[in-house]
Image (tube, rainbow, N blue to C red):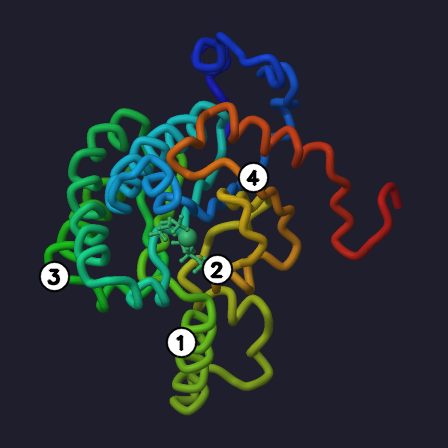
Amino acid sequence: MLPDLDKLREYYAEAPSDIRLEDVDLDRIPSHVSVIMDGNGRWATARGLDRSRGHVAGVDSLREAVTTSVRLGLDVLSVYAFSTENWRRPQREVDLLMHLFATTLVNELPLFHQENVRLRFLGDLDGLPDKTRRVFQSGLDATRDHTGMTFALAVNYGSRAEIARAARQIAREVRAGTLSPDQVDESALAERLYTRGLPDPDLLVRTSGELRLSNYLLWQLAYTEFYVTDTLWPDFSRWDLLRAVASYQGRARRFGGVVGS
Ligand code: IPE
Ligand code: IPE
Ligand code: MG
């Protein structure tokens, strides 16, 4: 997607000392950036606050990340918000997160309309509380006709469950005779993942310094460039995303081949 240069320059005025908009090549902006938003709890604990306050602060970072991604002209921004393993957290924290997802979505719909952002969800929405699921569905309906950036929110998402689900679906289709075993190739599997139709991420950002995937997009990240920052998610700003993109642009992506051949 082509960025609006005037808006972008205004958005990135007042640069800090280590990074400026001029440090990135606007002709080589990644198409799909994905973020594991991590460190909300530590951010709150470091301030003597309840973990929930970190999640609330994280919403501000997410809003800024969506706007930044639109300004930069990304095609897709995806974010990991709640994993299939996060149900193991204290019930109070889980309840707060489910409530926060619903209220945030309602509050941010005007932004999605203003910026022409189309919403997607990655994960098993059937496992969510009724209210959260209903709000998510209304968000999908409200942004269906938008033609700008896709914003994909991974909630109740687990990559192993996603791949097992795709395999199950393929098995059913083979048994029904609508798919032959010879047709079961990489694209057949990819088409049955939650990310169907989306390009694989070019860049994966993880905040809070953790060096693991935590069951996120195991299939889709096969050739993605990783960027890990110690910055905690509530502190992550437009400049951090720019730093990540600048780092990405300094990499040589070989996809198993040889550069320049
Ligand atoms: C990420 O922050 C948000 C979710 C997983 C919902 P955390 O809550 O994992 O924060 P830390 O890792 O405990 O600091
Ligand atoms: C990964 O973060 C999931 C999300 C950011 C939603 P976690 O905080 O749950 O990951 P682990 O437990 O540190 O691996
Ligand atoms: Mg965490």
Task: Judge whether 5 appears above or below 75 on screen.
Answer: above
- Tell us which disc is closer to us: 4 or 2: 4
Structural distance between the alpha carbons of marks 1 and 3:
22 Å
CB atoms of marks 4 and 1 within 8 Å? no
Read off the residue under disc 4: 229
| Mark 4: amino acid | Thr
Q: Is residue 242 left or right of residue 105?
A: right
- Tell us which disc is closer to us: 4 or 1: 4
* 42 vs 247, nearest the viewer: 42
Across and down, in percent, residue 150 comes to 39, 41
* 46 vs 120, nearest the viewer: 46
Q: What secondary structure is marked by label 3?
A: helix
- Tell us which disc is closer to us: 1 or 2: 2
Task: Judge whether 198 appears above or below 72 on screen.
Answer: below
| Mark 2: amino acid | Tyr
Q: Residue at x 38, y 89 (%)?
A: 176
Give residue 130's mark: 3
Of labels 4 and 2, earlier in sequence is 2
Give residue 216's mark: 2
Structural distance between the alpha carbons of marks 3 and 4:
35 Å
- Tell us which disc is closer to us: 3 or 4: 4
* 241 vs 5, nearest the viewer: 241
